[in-house]
């Protein structure tokens, strides 16, 4: 048989699927793959059920239902003051995963370079390669005792930009680190993008999961950035319905038109009942969005406190579903994959080895644990870890 595509051939199964399967196999509490164990708002789910019953259930418009595109534009205005034309500047996709893929395929040409930031979400690099482009990796500095947060090294970022740079992909709040990029870091990215005439694909799926009363700041709101950024959101995260796979993009009309051409041949469109329900959800009162972040912050605090009692060095998490631990105070007999494998088999707690977010030469002393679970589940995971260690 003739060989399949080289990029595809080189891929394994995602670490999230692998670790979830191991959790099931060993009866473990799954703090690996990031998904809440309670479904999001009943009124949003009811809206989906009603829309499915009442119909129509035929192909909605390729760009997305007008109701949802209007709701995305209004959400951008309400939370970030962004003026967005719903007809030309918003596109609905089947999840942020498709939004990322369609954006990269639409913008990249063979020979282009894409700047990616490590630890990098697993879907970005394979699509950059499928597009025939080359990735330039910039590595965040992991927290150390002297610097408590993951930091973006300016010199390395600057060096990654050059004449072939077409775009940078950034993710804030960031999976897996829980990092929220600072104002200074956003300004640096904006200035480099401007200097090199590059686009920025902003994966902002965790925009409503920022802690300590902080507000998410889209790069798109910085001076001069509206025309360069594609901002991506996900109903999966904003409404705790990760299986729904409804994503949305906002950007300059010319960029959205290009991304829509890719989208028309990836999925063409997204189930109309889910779109209708997400349109309803985006219109919910501010208290919903504030409550989502506050509830998640309490869960973070609960898991982090427990992990500290177990004896881990817990790294700061300013947003997302995730906390990372440096496990070396407790265990030094191998790397993070060995540790995560032991943890799921013997302590019966599932996690994600952070090395999975590095295509080469990874640090191997951290695992990611997901805190978007019910209190009793988090408590049971901590009890298992205490008993094991
Ligand atoms: N980007 C990041 C950083 C994520 O963590 C996830 C999801 N889990 C996605 C994209 C994909 O989102 P969706 O489920 O809407 O495709
Ligand atoms: N984004 C989720 C995570 O980081 C997983 C999504 C997936 O399984 N593809 O855990």
Image: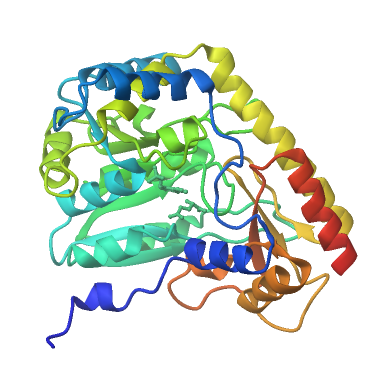
| Residue 335 in sight from this viewpoint | yes
* Residue 362 in the figure: left or right of residue 167: right
Q: Is residue 236 above or below residue 130?
A: above
* Residue 328 in the figure: left or right of residue 13: right
| Image quadrant in which the N terminus is located | bottom left
Write down the quadrant of residue 129 in the picture: bottom left
212 vs 44, nearest the viewer: 44
Q: Residue visible at 61% across and 42% down?
A: 37
Looking at the picture, how far across and down is residue 385, in whole percent? 82, 62
Q: Is residue 285 above or below residue 103?
A: above
Coloration mode = rainbow
Question: How many numbered discs, if any?
Answer: 0
Q: Is residue 139 above or below residue 7?
A: above
| Image quadrant in which the C terminus is located | bottom right
138 vs 191, nearest the viewer: 138
Looking at the picture, how far across and down is residue 274, in whole percent? 34, 29
Q: Is residue 137 above or below residue 5?
A: above
| Residue 76 in sight from this viewpoint | no
Looking at the picture, how far across and down is residue 337, in whole percent? 61, 75
Looking at the picture, how far across and down is residue 145, in whole percent? 76, 59
* Residue 242 in the figure: left or right of residue 64: right
Q: Residue visible at 68% across and 29% down?
A: 295
Q: Residue furthest bottom?
A: 1
Q: Residue furthest front?
A: 53
150 vs 73, nearest the viewer: 73
Q: Residue visible at 58% across and 61% down?
A: 141
């Amino acid at each position: 048989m003739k060989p399949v595509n080289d990029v595809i051939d080189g891929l394994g199964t995602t670490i999230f699927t692998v670790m979830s399967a191991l959790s099931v196999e060993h009866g473990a509490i799954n703090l690996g793959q990031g998904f809440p164990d309670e479904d999001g708002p009943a009124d949003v789910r009811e809206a989906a059920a009603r829309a499915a019953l009442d119909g129509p259930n035929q192909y909605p418009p390729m760009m997305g239902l007008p109701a949802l595109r209007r709701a995305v534009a209004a959400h951008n205005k309400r939370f970030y003051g962004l003026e967005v034309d719903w007809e030309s500047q918003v596109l609905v996709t089947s999840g942020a995963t498709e939004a990322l893929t369609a954006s990269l395929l639409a913008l990249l040409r063979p020979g282009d370079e894409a700047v990616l930031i490590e630890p990098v979400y697993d879907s970005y690099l394979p699509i950059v390669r499928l597009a025939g482009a080359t990735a330039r990796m910039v590595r965040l500095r992991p927290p150390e005792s002297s610097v408590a947060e993951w930091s973006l090294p300016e010199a390395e970022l600057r060096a990654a930009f050059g004449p072939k740079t077409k775009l940078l992909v950034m993710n804030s709040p960031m999976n897996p680190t829980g990092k929220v990029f600072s104002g200074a870091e956003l300004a640096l990215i904006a200035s480099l993008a401007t200097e090199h005439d590059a686009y920025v694909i902003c994966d902002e799926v965790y925009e409503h999961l920022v802690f300590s009363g902080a507000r998410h700041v889209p790069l798109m709101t910085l001076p001069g950035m509206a025309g360069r950024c594609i901002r991506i959101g996900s109903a999966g995260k904003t409404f705790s319905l990760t299986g729904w796979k409804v994503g949305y993009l906002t950007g300059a009309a010319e960029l959205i038109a290009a991304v829509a051409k890719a989208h028309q041949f990836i999925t063409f469109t997204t189930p109309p009942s889910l779109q209708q329900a997400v349109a309803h959800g985006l219109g919910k009162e501010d208290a919903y969005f504030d409550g989502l972040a506050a509830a998640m912050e309490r869960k973070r605090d609960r898991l982090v406190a427990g992990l500290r009692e177990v004896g881990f060095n817990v790294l700061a998490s300013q947003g997302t579903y995730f906390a990372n631990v440096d496990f070396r105070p407790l265990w030094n007999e191998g790397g993070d994959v060995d540790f995560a494998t032991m943890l799921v088999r013997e302590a019966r707690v599932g996690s994600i080895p952070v090395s999975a977010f590095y295509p080469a030469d990874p640090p191997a002393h951290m695992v990611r644990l997901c805190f978007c679970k019910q209190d009793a589940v988090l408590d049971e995971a901590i009890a298992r870890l205490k008993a094991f260690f």
